[in-house]
Image (spheres, coloured by chain):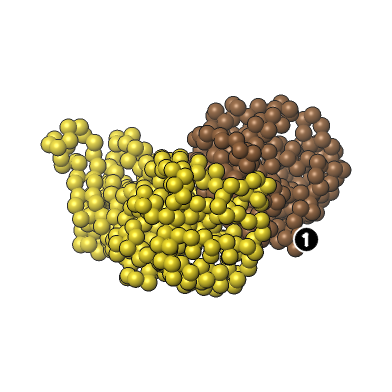
Amino acid sequence: MKKTHIPKLDDLLGGGVPAGSSIMFCANPGVDCEAFGYQMLNGLVKEGERGFIFTNVAEPDSIIYEFDSYGWDIVSAIENENVFFVDGSSSFIGAPSNAKYSFTDYSETEDVVLKAINDIPDGIAVINNLSTIIDYMGDLETVEIVKKWNKAAKENNTTIIYIFTEWDYEDSMVKKLKSSVDCVVELKTIEERVIVGQGFMVAGASWTEPLDTMILFFVIQPGGVKVYIPKILVTGPYNAGKSSFVKAISTKSVSVDRKAVGAFPTTIAMDIGHLDYKGFFADIFGTPGQERFDLILDVLSKEAVGAFIIIDSTAPQTFARAKEMIRKTRAEAIPKIIVANKQDLEGALSPDEIRDKMKLSKDIPIVPAVITEGKGTQECLDALLKLLYGD
Amino acid sequence: MVINLILRIQSGIPGLDQITADSKTGMGGIPENTATLVYGPPKVGKSIFCYQFMHGGLSLDEPCLYVLTDYGIKQLQQNTSDFGWELDNYIEKEMLYIVDAISSISGTKIINTENFSSSSVHNPTDIMVKLGVGTRYISQRSPRFRSILDSLTTLFAFNQELLIVRVLTAYIMRIREAGGTALITYTEGSADVKVETMLKAVVDNVIKLDGEYLTIEAMVGCGQKKAPYKITNEGIIIE
């Protein structure tokens, strides 16, 4: 097995990628996908493997500069001839190339890469970017090329990594492409108007049954792909049931309210929990509901990727406060679920009535719940995961 | 009665909001949250149109996301300064986010800052990554913002044409979802006629500049219009 050197990904893949197989990082436009290929190559080269980068989007010098920005030394590997470039970029912007292989016509792509694969038995090949090849070579032709490369790679025991930006291609072509590789890792965006987070998910791997879990990450320079435990916010008016909700969805939870005298010297009133649901990990931050604590809402809500807004379905007079809290926690700009709590009590409004009274867009799910009895909490989690994971 | 009120934002071009005015509401300007293609032959004022659209917004506290593919940030600062619009102040006030996709091609390595990203015209994937960061940055400052892509011409020169149509589709979708109003320029004849037709199909509004006349070929809530214009030291003025 070859390690991917992407944190958590090896766990999802049952230890790594078998030598000689093909893996595709398939990205929504807007996701930093190049770092995945480069990081994998860098890690394996450090372990003594050989490899090459095929590029049709950046000149070798820019890629070397990028490796340097990540804090990775590729220069010495190039000098030792452990890494080389297949340059399908320089000639197209009129720049000279000193890469081992370069070409001036796209029709040469297939053969040049085949040669390069044969140069590095047991090594690593990075293809950046597959989508550029598609529009030059045609849909079906590209699928055929990928199959030929994979075959050569298998014979050579070369592991081949594709970077693929999924623009609005025909679904059937994308399916064919994905099914022609051994493993597909989807790189997705978490969006609410704008991108608020990025995550990766293994869509399939021929050698293992991967976990159906999204891992959130960011790409930093220096450093590369770093995974993080996302923050989920639980907010809502006073006495709506926030603390009970945090407790209900968490494997472990602490209410700072109660601990205020003991573990924490100050009176920062909040709930903290840890969520581990269907493989999705998150830290849960419950905000206080009383207005006198509004000062810390801003701090608590920073960098959250999702929110639960808990409301008391029997108390429509608090709905305005709920909307104010959505605004103050900046939850308008992240995926969110309205938890319509206390559905068991007399006078509880239905989700539709609540939507109407709160003037909420129909895209925002409202889930009926009785938190104290654990009713609806799982539905809330499923609804949020659905928003975060997309289709 | 259903009233379809189309919100409009001031174009920043003297005279343009008057000729686009709705006969019923009297409101004119560029329809908000749409994408507008400004095209025409070289040297007719397409980039100047962009500067005015940007400056018009900035002076109303509407931030701007600017994607440069024809000229770098230095050139943008110089060109706008020629009209008396100084950008430094707006950059400092975090009202501008610039993605410079051309300076790196000439080998210039520019340090990225909080509201400046370097990218490459040859790498649309990277441009979209920077754009994602930029829309987030800008939309945190204002729910209403403007976005300019000047121009598609260079992208066509460095990439396969169909790929750029895909990139444009993704770009417009990203800006629209974020609540922005997009302006895209294109030099007539720099891509295949079929591709030109596709471009016009993915945008909402089409404005042609030919050096003498500004023609609104299509605009949400506004019929076709044509008016003479001239380029003065205050930019484009519709006569």
Residue B121 in picture, x, y percent from top left: 62, 47
Colour given to chain A in the rendered image:
yellow
The residue that mark 1 highlights is B193
User: Mark 1 — on which chain does it sit?
Assistant: B
Indicate the quadrant where residue A375 lies. bottom left
Q: Quadrant of the N terminus of chain A?
A: bottom left
Which residue is at the front of the view, B163 or A95?
A95
Residue B46 in picture, x, y percent from top left: 75, 42
Q: How would you rate the neighbour count of disc 1 (Cα within 10 Å): few for under 14, some for 14-19, many for 20 or more? A: few
Colour given to chain B in the rendered image:
brown
Task: Tell me which amino acid carries mark 1.
Answer: Val
Q: Classify residue B41 as left or right of residue A29.
A: right
Q: Quadrant of the C terminus of chain A?
A: bottom left
The correct choice, above or below, for A275 with respect to B85 in the image is below
Instruction: Residue at 76% x, 59% y: name it.
Output: B192
Instruction: Residue at 34% x, 37% y: name it.
Output: A299
Indicate the quadrant where residue A115 lies. bottom right
Number of marks: 1
Residue B100 in picture, x, y percent from top left: 60, 40
The correct choice, above or below, for A304 with respect to A14 in the image is above
Residue A330 in picture, x, y percent from top left: 41, 44
Residue B203: in sight, yes or no? yes
Which residue is at the front of the view, A45 or A25?
A45
